[in-house]
Image (cartoon, helix red, strand yellow):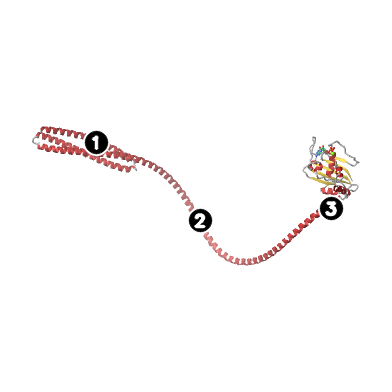
Amino acid sequence: MRLKRLELFGFKSFADRMVLDFSAPVVGIVGPNGCGKSNVVDAVRWALGETRPTSMRGGEMTDVIFKGSASRPPLAVAEVTLVLDNSEGGLPERGSEVSITRRVYKSGEGEYLIDGHVVRLTDVREMLYGTGLGSRGYSVLEQGKIDAILSANPLERRAIFEEAAGISRYRARKKETESRLERVQADCLRLDDVLGELERRRRSLKLQAGRAQRYLESREAWQGEGQRLARHSAHALAAEEAELSVGLVEAETAAEAQRAERAATEQEIGTRALEQESLQGAIERTNAAVAEAAADLRGLDERRNQLGERVQTARRAGQEEGARGAELARRLATRQEELAAAEARIAELETGAREAGERAGVLAREVRTLEADLARLARAQEAQAQVVLQRLNARTHETNQAQAVERALALSEERITRARARADELAAQLAAAQAEETERAREQAEAAAQLEHLEGERAAAL
Ligand code: ATP
Ligand code: MG
């Protein structure tokens, strides 16, 4: 079996589609270092199913895709097709030409095809067992591989011979069958476990089925009893319904009456609401009036305080007037005492005069004249004293009036003003009275001096 043709596209340094025809006897490929000789061998091994990127001299399998060069962009897929000559029937059940294709995409996905049909890697390996072909077969001996075979241990060498003898296919099949057998045995064990579990569940389900059967029987009995009870209840309910329908008619009548009542009540509520609105208005007006009255009250309070102050002032003035009246009364009493003393003296003098009347007839007449004068003066003084007393009374009266006015002042400022004017008037009158009194006192002093003079003359006459 021979390699007939190699078709490369996008694999390593083969950017363009390249077909290498090996139909003529080919001895070798010659070229300078790095021209891509080893890439051809790599392509053959890769198409045969090499899965180790390192053996492709790369880090990942996608490294085999053409990476691009200075003049060309990189590609997204690499594809290699081997065409084998099978005219000798090395690959049974295949045609005279067998193609094996492998593709890998940039995404990492890949696929294998045999004669253009997509297959698995295992199918490719399976087909090639025993032919010496394969990614690790002895048919591809790259650089250093001969050294590796020569220095291989007996076990590795045996693998190469077994492959050459065509028994590696059966060995591989045996290995796969053994591993399948192991898997089947493991599956059997698992099946035993599952069977055990299912048996347990079957028993449990049997118990549950018994319970369910009993439940169904009980439920049937219960339903029968329930139906009987329902029939009985239906009779009772029918009677009750008849009663209730009578009650319903009554209730509807009552409801009608209540609806009418409710309408009347709602109407009344409307009326009340209107009344409430008007009352609210009245309350607001009253509140405003109250606020106004409060303001007035505050004004009146202020006014009262002012009047109180003025009453205090008037009271002090009244007290001063009282003190001055008392002083006047005291002085009047003194005058009266002096008058009494003068009268006593005059009486004494009269007695003396009467005793010497006859001796001093002329003088007596003069004395009588003087006495008449003196009496006149005394009357005048008495009248003056009366006037003073009257005025004192009047002032007392005025003071009382002022007190009354003081009380009234709490209500009226006007009257206080009048009282004060009156008090001022009285004070003026009092001043006039005092002046008059002073005049009278002076006249009295003159009379006394005259009396003394007369007395002196009388003494001289005697
Ligand atoms: P030597 O005589 O030294 O063994 P060679 O002829 O065997 O050389 P290869 O090793 O086959 O040469 O090829 C190496 C060349 O392939 C390098 O020039 C490298 O740039 C190129 N090459 C490898 N992988 C890619 C890739 N993915 N895309 C583009 N070029 C690649
Ligand atoms: Mg090389």
Which residue is the site of mark 2?
A: 262
Residue with the mark numbered 1: 434
Residue type indicated by callout 3: Lys
Q: How many labels does the image show?
A: 3
On screen, 67 above or below 197?
above
> For the residues marked 3 and 2, what is the alpha-carbon distance in whole angstroms?
103 Å
Label 2: how many residues lie within 10 Å, few (<14), some (14-19) or many (20+)? few
Q: Earlier in the sequence, mark 3 or mark 2?
A: 3
Tell me where residue 424 appears, x and y as whole percent. 29, 37
Marks 3 and 2: which is nearer the front?
3
Which residue position is annotated with label 3? 174
Q: Do the residues labelled 3 and 1 touch (CB within 8 Å)?
A: no
Say what amino acid the circle numbered 2 marks.
Arg
Residue 404: image quadrant is top left
Q: Tell me the SS state at disc 3.
A: helix
Answer with mark 3 or mark 1, whichever residue precedes in sequence: 3
- Mark nearest the camera among 3 and 1 is 3
Looking at the picture, tell me which residue is in the foreground, 296 or 222.
Answer: 222
Q: What element carries label 1?
A: helix
